[in-house]
Image: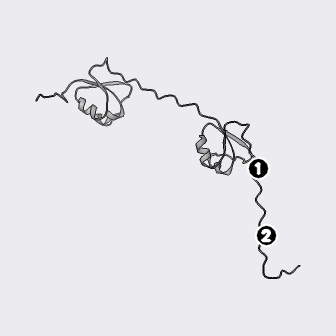
Amino acid sequence: GYWVGQGRLMVVWFCGRPEVSSLFGGAQLSPTKCYLSATITTDELDARGMRWWSSQDECRCVPTTPPPSPPPQKIYFCGQSEVWHLFDYKIEPTSCYFSYEFSRQEISDLGVEVYLTSEHCDCKPPPPPPPPSPSPPSLQASTAA
């Protein structure tokens, strides 16, 4: 068989991502900068899932920008008691409110109807409570006053 020279000492270049900070005693490195080391082996970097280069010219630590998140959606809903805990001021059940902060799902999960336009957001006052059901006739004769 032949011997593969893995883990041999050579200068490696790598980005200062959090995965390698333990190799530097927990030092905070900049993830967008290239660092070189003659004591860290390529095996150690591979074990951490780190990409490495053998020359500074090849080292690329440009942060990959996450895809832009979709713009927040404006939602409308009535100020029912189910959503009162989301606000630090009093809101009215008969008024329509809008928010960019809460998702449609968050509000509908609380049992409150969500609207995409203010025209549809019709916050009628809650129906009056049903009249109390008549109490069953009692067996005792009531004395009229």
Mark identifier at residue 40 = none
Give 135 or 45, whichever is nearer the viewer.
135
Q: Write the residue at 80% across / 82% down.
A: 140
Residue 58: horizontal and vertical position, in percent? Answer: 31, 19
Q: Is label 1 in a helix, a strand or a loop?
A: loop
Colouring method of the image: one colour
Q: Residue furthest top?
A: 57
Q: Is residue 74 visible?
A: yes
Name which residue type carries label 1. Pro
Q: Residue furthest left?
A: 1
State left or right for residue 142 relative to residue 98: right
Q: Is residue 40 visible?
A: no
Mark identifier at residue 125 = 1
Q: Quadrant of residue 131?
A: bottom right
Of the numbered discs 2 and 1, the one sitting upstream in the chain is 1
Q: Tell me if residue 38 comes above or below residue 123 in the rendering.
A: above
Residue 118: horizontal and vertical position, in percent? Answer: 71, 37
Name which residue type carries label 2. Pro
Q: How much space separates mark 2 and mark 1, taking CA atoms?
A: 26 Å
Instruction: Tell me the quadrant of the picture where the N terminus can be found.
Output: top left
Instruction: Tell me the quadrant of the picture where the C terminus can be found.
Output: bottom right
Tag 2 residue: 134
